[in-house]
Amino acid sequence: MLYAVLLGLFLPLVSFLGLMSASNIIGRRLTGFIACASVLISFVCFSSLLWIYTNTQMQPQTFFIYHWIPVSGIDADFTLYIDPLALLMTLIITGIGFLIHLYSIGYIEHEEDFARYFACLNFFIFAMLLLVLAGNLLLLFAGWEGVGLASYLLVGYWYHRPAAAQAATKAFVVNRIGDCGFLIALLLTFQIFGTGEITDVTQRVAQLFAIGAPLLTLMTFLYFVGAMGKSAQLPLQVWLPDAMEGPTPVSALIHAATMVTAGVYLVVRMHDVYLLTPLTLYIIAIIGAATALFAALCALAQTDLKRVLAYSTISQLGYMFLACGVGAFYAGMFHLTTHAFVKALLFLAAGNVVHMMHGSTNMDYMGGLWKIFFKTRWLFLIGAIALAGIPPLAIFFSKDLILEQVHHAGYELLFYTGLLTSILTAFYMTRAYYLTFLGKTRLEEKIIKVVEEAPSIMTGPVTALAVLSIIGGFLGYAFGAMPPLESFLHKVGIGLPGNQPSGNFVFTLETLASTVGALLAIALAYTIYSKYAQRLGAPLQVLKKAFYIDQIYDLLFVNPLKFVASLITRFIEPKMIEGSILATAHGTQKTARWLQQMQSGQIRSYVAWMAIGMALLIVYMAF
Amino acid sequence: MDILFFIYISMAMFAVGVIGVLVKRNALIFFLSIELMLNAANLLFVAFARQWGNETGLVWVFFVLVVAAAEAAVGLALIINLFRSKQIVDVDQYNVLKG
Amino acid sequence: MFPFATIAQWILGIVLVLSSFGVILLEKPIHASLSFLLTLLMLAALYLQLSAQFIAVMQVLVYAGAILVIFMFVIVLFQDAYQQLSKFQPRSYKPFLIFAAIAFTGSLIFLGYQLRAHPPAQRALPTGYGTVESLGEALYLDFFFPFEAVIFVFLIALIGAVYIGRKAK
C-alpha cells in the first residue's frame, strides 16, 4: 500500500521534471498526454487506496519515509499520513485535477509555451498532494509553500503581461504574510510539543492543556492566520480577484477547488487542537461570516465574469470557515467537496466562453450568448443554480447544513449573515448568468460571426463536473442517519458538534428560509436585469472596487514600502554602499596621482627629497 | 678643538655643496657642487686619519680621488652629449624620465 | 699668542669656506670654477697641515690639475649657455628646495652642536705617516684588491667617457 501512495504522490513530480527538461523535444499532444496520464494514474492509485480502506477496515496509518531533518529540537521526519480526510482531499485533487488537465489541452491550444503550463500544473498537483498527505507539520508547510509557488508560476503564466506579473507577485506576497503566521505557529508547536508530527500533537494536546489555554489559543490563531492568507479570508483576500489574470483552468483548479481549500484542510486536520480553544474558533467563525458577506457584496457589482466567480469563491470559503468555527468540521469538509465540484464547473464553463471570445472576460461586452454556446449555456446554468443553493443540487445540502449548525450553536447574528449571503449569492449568480448568456447581445457584429461553441475536449470535462454537481450532494445526504461521506470522515472524529449525525438536520426551518430566499433572489435578479437594465446605472463603484480595500492597502503598506525602497535605491545604495566602494577606488587613484607628482623628472626635487631624508637621519642619529 | 674645527669646516663645505645642488640650474655648476661635496668628505677622512693615526683613511682618500676623476670625466661627457642634442644646460629641462 | 699653525689653520679654513660660497654664488661659470680652484688649493694646504703630504700633492695634481682643467674646457665650450637660463622657467618647486636646503643645513648644525661636548682625544702618529712610502706599502700590500679594482673602474670610465662624448654619426 505504501507503493500506491508513493506512486500517486511522486508521479506528478516526475512528470513535472520530465516535461520541464524535455520541453523542446516533446510535441503538444504528447505533453498533454503525459501530463493527464500522470494525474490519472495518481487518481487511480488513490481510488484504489480508498477501496482498500473502506473494504478492509483499515485504520489511519503513518508511513515513515526517512529522517528529513534530524536536528534535535525539530526532529522533522518525512512521514505520510493516510486517513479518510487525506484520502478525500487526494481524490478531489487528482479527480478534478485530471478533468482540468484534459480541459487544458483544449485551452492551451493557441499557446506556444504549453510544456511550461502542463509542467507547472503537475508540480501543483504534487505540492498539493504533499500538503494533504503530510504527517509532519513541517512537511505540510513544504507543500504549503509549494502550492504558493505553483500559484505564482501559473498566475504569471503570461508573464509578459504586466497585469499578470503583478497579480502573481501580489498573490505570492499576500500568501507570504499568512505564511509568517504559520511559521510562528510551527515554531510554537515545536517548542510546546517537541515534535511536528500531527498525530503526536493531536493525541497529546488534551493531556497537556486545559480548554482555553492562552498559549494554545495563540498557536491555533497563528495557524489560522496562515489559513487566512492561503484561503483568502478578510483581510488577506486581496490576491484572489487579481489572480484571475491567469488562465481559466488554473483559476478553476487552484483558486476554486484545491489550493484555497488548503487553509480549511489545515483547520480540519487540527480539529482536536481547535476544539480546545473556543476563542480561536469564535474568531474563525466571525471572520468566515464577515468574509462571506463582504465578498458577496463585492460580487454584486463586478463586470468581469471571472472576478464574480473569484469573489464567490472567497464567499464560499468564508462559509467553510464559519462551519469550522462553530465546531461543525464535517459540514466544512462537505461544503469543500461540493464547492469544489460546482466552482470548477463554473470556472471551466466560463473558460469555454472566455476561450472562444479570445480572452475577453468583460461582461459589458457579452450577452445573448445563449444563441451561440448551445452546450455551455446549460452547463453554466447548472453551476449557477447549484451555487445558489437550490435543491437537489450539490451546494444546497452542504450550505444548509452549515446554516443549521450555526443556528443550532446559538450564533444568531452569524446565522443571519450566512442567510443574507446565500440570498446574495443567488442574486449575483443570476445576474452573472443573465449578463453573459441572456438578453440582447452587446457583442459587435464581426465578433458574433467568429464565436462558436467550444470543442468537445473542453466541454467534455465540464459535462462530467456538471454531473458531479448534480449528484454530488447525495454523498452527504442520508437515506438514514449518517450519509456515506460523514460516516467515512467520522472514523477520524470529524463530525458535527456533539457528534450528532447529520441525518437529523435535513429539512428544517433554516432550510426553508434559505431555499425560499434563494428562489426569490433569482426571480428578483432576473426581473431587474431583463426589464430595468437601462435604468440601472453603472454598478456601485464602492462595491466594484471591493470597498477600496486595494487602495487602502496601497496607501498603508505598499506606498510606504515603495518609498523606502526608492530611498534606498536613490540615496543609500549609490551614495553609501556603492559610494564607499567607489570612494575607495577614487581615493586610491587620487593618492596615486598625488604620488605621481613626486616623479617629476626633476633632479633637483629628487636631491631635495634625499636631503630631507638625510637631515632626518642625522637628527635621529645625533640624539 | 682641533678635530672639531675640521669637522665644522667639512660640514660647512658639504652644506654649501648641497645648497648648490639644490639651488643652481646650470648643469656645470650643479656638477661643481657635487665635486665640492666630495672634497668635504675627503677633508673629513684626512682629519680623522690624522686623529686616529691610521693610514687607512689616507688610502680611502686616494680611492675617492681616483673615482672622482673618473666620475667627472664621464659626467662631463654626458653633459656634452646632452648639450649637443638639446642645446640647453638647464637641469630642469632634463626631465624625460618624468612620470 | 696663538701658535702659527693655529692661525694658519684658521685663515685657511675661512678662505676655504668663503671660496666654496663663491662657487655657488658667482654668476659666471668661469668665475665659479676659479673659485673652486681656490678651494682646492686651500684644501691642499690643509692636508699638508694634517701631515698628509702625498694626499696634498695628489689633490693638486689630480683635482686641480686634471679635473678642474676638464671642467674649464667644458665651461669654455658652453660659456654663453648660461645666459639662456633666463629664458626658461624653473620647473622645480622652489620653496620646497629651499626648505630641503634649510632642513639639511639645520640638521648638520644640530649634529655639530651635539658633538661639541665630546671632543675625541688624539693619538700618536706612527713614523712615516702620510709619506709616499707608507702609503705605497698600504696600497700595494694591504689594499691591493681595491687598488686594482679602482684602476679597472678608471679604465671603464675612460672608455665610457670617450664613447659618450664622441660626435654622433
Image (spheres, coloured by chain):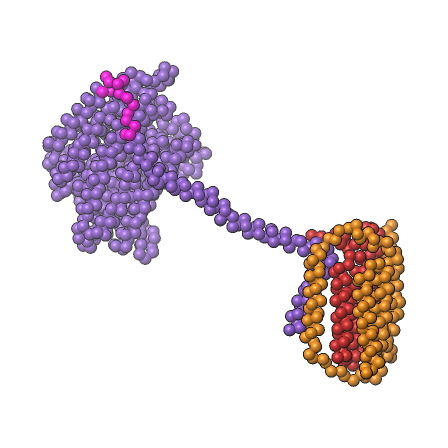
Chain colours: A purple, B red, C orange
Residue in the foreground of this view, choosing between A442 and A120? A442
User: In the picture provided, is C166 more to the left or to the right than A159?
Assistant: right
User: Which residue occupies 17% across, 24% down?
Assistant: A520
Tell me residue C83's x, y (percent). 83, 53
Q: Quadrant of residue B24?
A: bottom right
Tell me residue A367's x, y (percent). 30, 19
Tell me residue A535's x, y (percent). 26, 18
Q: Where does the magenta region start and end? A: A528-544
Q: Residue A471: in sight, yes or no?
A: no
Residue in the foreground of this view, choosing between A47 and B39? B39
Q: Quadrant of residue C129?
A: bottom right
User: In the picture provided, is A51 more to the left or to the right than C132?
Assistant: left
Name the residue at the front extreme: C1
Looking at the image, is B67 positioned above or below residue A542?
A: below
User: In the picture provided, is C129 more to the left or to the right than A236?
Assistant: right
Residue A535 among magenta residues = yes
Residue in the foreground of this view, choosing between A611 and A193? A611
User: In the picture provided, is A72 more to the left or to the right than A611?
Assistant: left
User: Which residue occupies 13% across, 34% down?
Assistant: A478
User: Which residue occupies 27% across, 42% down?
Assistant: A227
Tell me residue A142's x, y (percent). 33, 45
Q: Residue A164: in sight, yes or no?
A: yes
Residue A371 among magenta residues = no
Q: Quadrant of residue C24?
A: bottom right
